[in-house]
Amino acid sequence: GIQVEQSPPDLILQEGANSTLRCNFSDSVNNLQWFHQNPWGQLINLFYIPSGTKQNGRLSATTVATERYSLLYISSSQTTDSGVYFCAVHSGTYKYIFGTGTRLKVLA
Amino acid sequence: DAGVIQSPRHEVTEMGQEVTLRCKPISGHDYLFWYRQTMMRGLELLIYFNNNVPIDDSGMPEDRFSAKMPNASFSTLKIQPSEPRDSAVYFCASSISGTHQPQHFGDGTRLSIL
């Protein structure tokens, strides 16, 4: 099956800093989503992005499907951005595979 | 619009008891997913349904686990008998078929088996 790797595993930032999170996948995919799991455990959908670039406020994401990776950019980070960021992919069967996540802590 | 609704939010029970987790998907969504999250294994897909029919249950860990979807607005995940290693957060998610349609997750059920 598809392997999904995320990096870095942990990230600590000062409020206001920018960051880039990476998701590598081992095979072609039909769907790629980025999620934020907040400190209360809720999984919030950030982007559906199997290819191309999308932006939503301070967050943006780019997926280069031919090179099998996706990047999530967080600009001007805030303490509320803390949590775990996951990418999830499937290759057409709706059988989603999640990465192991990047744990982000933003310090005030 | 209401999101995916899971109940209970927390469940604590003793080993050997039957546990039933419930999920109401978003109205109009035809895909429903059950996931389990643990520290050791991360987020794992257990089973998913399309139009109330189980499509892939290869992630169900063993015969003690079963899932049903009797209608488009309700699904259950049952563990019988429960064991301490089943302790985890169980999430339900739903989506609508077609391109560019993301999954939407419920708030999860935190299950502790003593």
Image: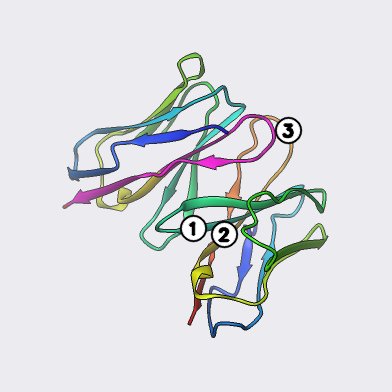
Q: Secondary structure at mark 1?
A: strand
| Mark 2 lies on residue | B91
Residue B29 visible? The answer is no
Q: Is residue B61 left or right of residue A6?
A: right
Look at the image and give the residue range highlighted in magenta: A86-107
Closest to the observer, A17 or B93:
B93
Sequence order check, earlier mark of 2 and 3: 2
Callout in the foreground (3, 1):
1
Q: Quadrant of residue B63?
A: bottom right
Q: Position of residue B7 (x, y in %)?
A: 62, 72
The answer to whether tags 2 and 3 share a subunit is yes
Q: Position of residue B28 (x, y in %)?
A: 77, 49
- Asked whether the beta carbons under mark 3 and mark 1 sit within 8 Å of each other, the answer is no
State the residue at coordinates (63%, 64%): B5
Q: Is residue A25 above or below residue B103?
A: above
Q: Secondary structure at mark 3?
A: loop
Sequence order check, earlier mark of 3 and 1: 1
Q: Which class describes the residues within 10 Å of circle 1: few (<14), some (14-19), or many (20+)?
A: some
| Mark 1 lies on residue | B37
Q: CA distance from mark 2 to mark 3?
A: 22 Å
